[in-house]
Image (spheres, rainbow, N blue to C red):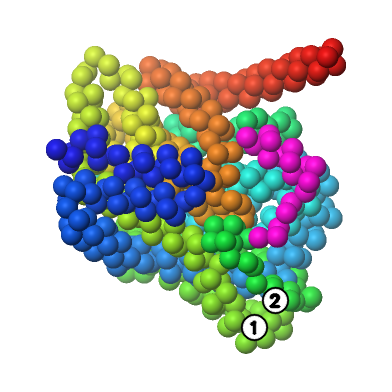
Amino acid sequence: MFVNSFWALLPAIIAIALALITKEVYSSLFIGIVVGGLLYSGFNLEGTIQHVFVDGMIAQLSDPWNVGILIFLVILGTMVMLMNRAGGSAAFGRWAVAHVKTKTGAQLATILLGILIFIDDYFNCLTVGSVMRPLTDKHKISREKLAYLIDATAAPVCIIAPISSWAAAVTGFVDGANGLTLFVRAIPYNFYALLTIVMMLTLTFAKFDFGPMKEAEHLTKHEGIKPAKSWASSITGAEDQPEPPVSLKGKVSHLVFPIVALIVCCVIGMIYTGGFFSGENFIDAFSNSDASVGLVFGSVVALILTVIFYLATRVLSFNECMNAIPEGFKSMVPAILVLTFAWTLKAMTDSLGAKDFVAGLVSQFASSNEIMSLLPAVVFLVAVFLAFATGTSWGTFGILIPIVVSVFDANLSSELMIISISACMAGAVCGDHCSPISDTTIMASAGAQCDHIKHVSTQLPYAMTAAGISFVTYLVAGVLRVWYVSLAFGIILTVAVILGIKLLGGKSETASTTVTTDK
């Protein structure tokens, strides 16, 4: 009764609704998990406990891919802690404060750094957050706005970067065709990712915010940043421990070296797992790489090189470097806990057949030749809903991309197939961007040290605006099937919508002021 039906999505819907209503993540996710266990077991208590903890949580924490991601997270936390203690982040902050004089400049610098760190979204979130917090705090940019800038340059940038963990994941879901070729051809049609970047730049240059983000920015402007509690303590309720002293010898190079080492080593680690050093060419090796293992290999080597560099430059002692390892782990515990719950919730929806239910809906629609031009827009909507409900982009790729490829018989000459695959990727990123149970959204909150639910609620209007514009653009692309015309239409529409919202907002404020004055 509950399997392979709309009921399969109920656990995720309950978890998301509770998180938004109660502003509390852990209990909301756990209740959603329990609901999934109850539906799967037919409301049998023993079966529910077995399914939730053994088939769900334990299975997810023993999955090699997930373990690799957790190890990568811990190493990233350690690297960030090392960069902070070595004074690299502080040195960059001083340099940035001296050279970036305006609030607009601070936001542009954050966006630029987010675009440059394209190798992985987790790496992006934590690094950009750690590096840019001093600068954005100086210019009274709210932590909610920083979290949005981080989140909007994490997955959206990775999904249009051919050399990234996301490109490797997407190519792995394509059978019967060259996955990387499809990925590259789909980039110009990835409207949500591209238009999100356009939207960020428009908002920044227009010096404008709307919705809950406007309130957060107003509050920060008048009251400033209140860093009394870290992101971790805002979730756990625990008081922060006194921060260890930061080295006064730190230079910008003590920030740049670890970041460059991470990027280079992670790329090498990924192509190594794809067989590059066994004779495969670079493109095939990257397409066939195991991103989870490759990122672990690369981050471990980068961590070792960073420790050696810090010791050689005498910015930290060996004991100080080693003490940063458990501290880095502790800084990631809240994110790891939320990720564990999010993965377990996904396991519940998978066991209830959410994939098959959604796949059936898409296949039925695609079988109608009369309305094939609408397929990209429909795939986009389905991907948004599925990624929002499950909190995973990659899982959405795995469900929808094979369906789209099979509909077109892996015909690389079909422009509509390219558009539909891109719509799947764009929708998955959009749903992931909106979802409070998404791992990337969680990591953006961690990187910005922002309350997670506040990040979700302030970001949602922005993400939904970009989603609506992307949907209309996919309708146009399905008819025209020319990327540069469709993309130009989307960019013009994005700028027009943002400026229109600003104009309407300005008129309403003027009217409100006039009414108040008359009274």
Q: Quadrant of the C terminus?
A: top right
- Pointer 1 residue: 320
In this view, the residue in front, 219 or 150, is 219
Is 28 within the magenta? no
Q: What residue is drawn where x is 59% and y is 57%?
A: 234
The picture places residue 308, in percent across and down from the top left corner, at 60, 82
Q: What residue is drawn where x is 25% and y is 30%?
A: 362
The answer to whether residue 143 is seen in the rendering is yes
Report the Cα–Cα distance between label 1 and label 2: 10 Å
Residue type at tag 2 = Pro
- Pointer 2 residue: 244
Residue type at tag 1 = Glu
Q: Are marks 1 and 2 in contact (CB under 8 Å)?
A: yes
* 328 relative position to 41: left or right: right
Q: Between disc 1 and disc 2, whose residue precedes? A: 2
Which of discs 1 and 2 lies nearer the camera? The answer is: 2
The picture places residue 27, in percent across and down from the top left corner, at 42, 53
Above/below status of 306 relative to 428 = below
Instruction: Check disc 2: other Cα within 10 Å, few if <14, some if 14-19, many if 20+.
Output: few
Q: Identify the element where label 2 is drawn.
A: loop
**Quadrant position of residue 480:** top left
Magenta segment? 212-229
The answer to whether residue 405 is seen in the rendering is no
Q: Quadrant of the N terminus?
A: top left
The picture places residue 380, in percent across and down from the top left corner, at 38, 30
Q: What residue is drawn where x is 54% and y is 74%?
A: 303
* 274 relative position to 335: left or right: left
Q: What residue is drawn where x is 52% and y is 65%?
A: 332
**Quadrant position of residue 422:** top left
In this view, the residue in front, 41 or 314, is 41
Return the mark for residue 426.
none
Q: Identify the element where label 1 is drawn.
A: helix
